[in-house]
Amino acid sequence: MNVAACDANTPWDTHIVKSCVAQVTVLEWDQSGHYLLIGDTLAAANAEIWTTPTHLLNEWTRVANICIPDEPIQA
């Protein structure tokens, strides 16, 4: 499964943020729109925070992650 982002003005031009084998259960932007939370469940709940340091959609960096066994990630 891929998580992709695009500019609303050019929706045909998508950029992959993350590829994973687990099902993504949470996808949420912070209030400022600078950080993206991606939560999935593979063997354990995994939550990651991603950002674009240069504000370009083709360059994503994971800035934080946490893995919590036996706890589902829910919005």
Image (spheres, grey):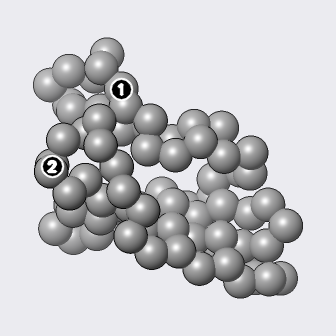
Per the image, the residue denoted by label 1 is 14
Residue found 83% across the figure and 82% down from its top:
70
Q: Quadrant of residue 2?
A: top right
Residue found 66% across the figure and 61% down from its top:
40
Q: Quadrant of the N terminus?
A: top right
Q: Position of residue 19 (x, y in %)?
A: 59, 42
The answer to whether any part of residue 42 appears in the image is: yes
Q: Position of residue 48 (x, y in %)?
A: 51, 68
Task: Look at label 2 and name its amino acid.
Answer: His
Task: Look at label 1 and name its amino acid.
Answer: Thr
Identify the mark nearer the N-term, 2 or 1: 1
Decide: few, some or many residues near mark 2? Use Cα within 10 Å; few <14, some 14-19, many ≥20: few
Q: State left or right for residue 54 relative to residue 74.
A: left
Q: Quadrant of residue 21?
A: top right
Dot 1: element: strand
Q: Quadrant of the C terminus?
A: bottom right
Q: Position of residue 37 (x, y in %)?
A: 44, 65
Per the image, the residue denoted by label 2 is 55
Residue lying furthest top in this view?
Answer: 12
The answer to whether any part of residue 75 appears in the image is: no
Q: Position of residue 61 (x, y in %)?
A: 36, 57
The vertical placement of 61 against 49, above or below, is above
Marks 2/1: CA–CA distance = 15 Å
Residue found 71% across the figure and 50% down from its top:
23
Residue found 30% across the figure and 20% down from its top:
13
The vertical placement of 12 against 53, above or below, is above
Q: State left or right for residue 8 relative to residue 30.
A: left
Decide: few, some or many residues near mark 1? Use Cα within 10 Å; few <14, some 14-19, many ≥20: some
Q: How many marks?
A: 2
Dot 2: element: loop
Q: State left or right for residue 60 relative to residue 27.
A: left
